[in-house]
Image (cartoon, helix red, strand yellow):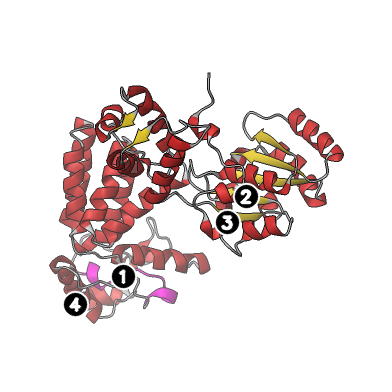
Amino acid sequence: MKEPLASRIRPRLLNEVIGQKHLTGENKILRRCIEEKYLFSMILHGPPGTGKTTIATVIANELQLPYKFFHAVHGTKKDLDTIFQEAKLYPGLILIVDEIHRLHKDKQDLLLSHIEKGTIFLIGATTENPYHSINPAIRSRCHLLEIKSFSQDEIKELLQRACSHEGGFAKKIEIQEEASDYIARLANGDIRFALNILEACVLLSPDNIIHEQIVKDYITTSNLGIHHHGDAYYDVLSAFQKSIRGSDVDAALYYLGILILSKDMEAIERRLLVTAYEDIGLANPAAVSRCVQAIDAAKRVGFPEARIPLSAAVIDLTLSPKSKSAENAIDHVLQHLQQSSYQIPEYLKLTPVHLEQEDKYDYARNDLWDKIQYLPDAVKNIQFYQPTSHSAYEKVLAENLKKLRKYPRTKHLSSLKHNIK
């Protein structure tokens, strides 16, 4: 059995690396490291299929240093101890740790002192944001280098290399421009995904020529590039919510489409509800209500039909007037409460004591209710809610509020009762 195509054509030297010019170009950090024969521990972070471990091995090859692979999940403490013993025999040993964000704390503790002493050089690879997923103690001892997704042109270049490379198809396979374009679009920056498609299409090609139709017959959907609880997943959710907030209906539908293809009803439901109340809110309560109804309908019918009510809700929310006044109001309250808190006025308590009947809240006098002071004295003049004028509905609320705030409220209930008969 042959190695996978991606492994057979893997670059060994820096000049063979396609892309990542921000790291490998003239006077860039990795180029300078190799030119000066200087190395430091580093974390390479970026999306799947962007060549993180390949770049790690290229660094080792260029510096002519021994290296060992260690998988954060499957590797054991015993494996690490063996590597540390080997490092004593081979100074400058490079330890390449795949999926370093999943390294257990006990293994992290073992690594720390060796990184600190320089007995090993750590090159970690991760698809996650290192600021969120990497132990701060390890992160502070490493340089963080971002590995970027391949552009479509770079993927096409790599596909051509695979067809001509001795370890690949040694010029026995031809890929047409249209097929190369199509694979590059499907791959979404992931070269491993692209090379896997190419390898499968070679098996399907009767004449050793890869046509666009062969690719279409083999694969029917693109690489979404997300998995639940990964950074890319949360990036899609963030872009989805921000597109609705920014009233870009086409972008909002695009990100909704990604979430629909990933069958993530729970995430769609949560983000739509949060966005409806946070960003549309009092500017269009009817749209908020329709959103809730659309989510209920989508959950009842399930995918693929669920896409229809969800699409309607997204279009409705995106093109609706926006108001964050409700969120701002409660955040103002919570911020104030974190700094101070006051006793509830006696006449508002459920069972007030030591109050004369005239000073008690009167459940029968609804004509007094909008004239009573409900806030504690220390905060009675604070106006937490500030309405916007982004919709006719909130303008009505603002007018009503203006009338209510026109007259001061009182805590002297006995006087209020006598003055208003």
Label whose residue precedes the other's in the sequence (1 or 4): 1
Q: Are marks 4 and 2 in contact (CB under 8 Å)?
A: no
| Label 2 element class | strand
Name the residue that disc number 2 marks: 43
Name the residue that disc number 1 marks: 385
Label whose residue precedes the other's in the sequence (4 or 3): 3
Name the residue that disc number 4 marks: 403
- List x then y, in percent, for residue 267: 34, 42
Mark in the foreground, 3 or 1: 3
Q: Which residue is depicted at the point 38% across and 75% down?
A: 380
Query: How many labels sit on residues?
Result: 4
Is residue 180 shown to the viewer in this render?
yes
Is residue 34 in the magenta section? no
- Type of the residue with mark 4: Lys
State the extent of the magenta-drawn residues as a range.
368-380
Between marks 3 and 1, how big is the CA–CA gap?
54 Å
214 or 241, nearer to the observer: 214
| Label 1 element class | loop
Mark in the foreground, 4 or 2: 2
The label shown at residue 24 is: 3
- List x then y, in percent, for residue 169: 45, 30
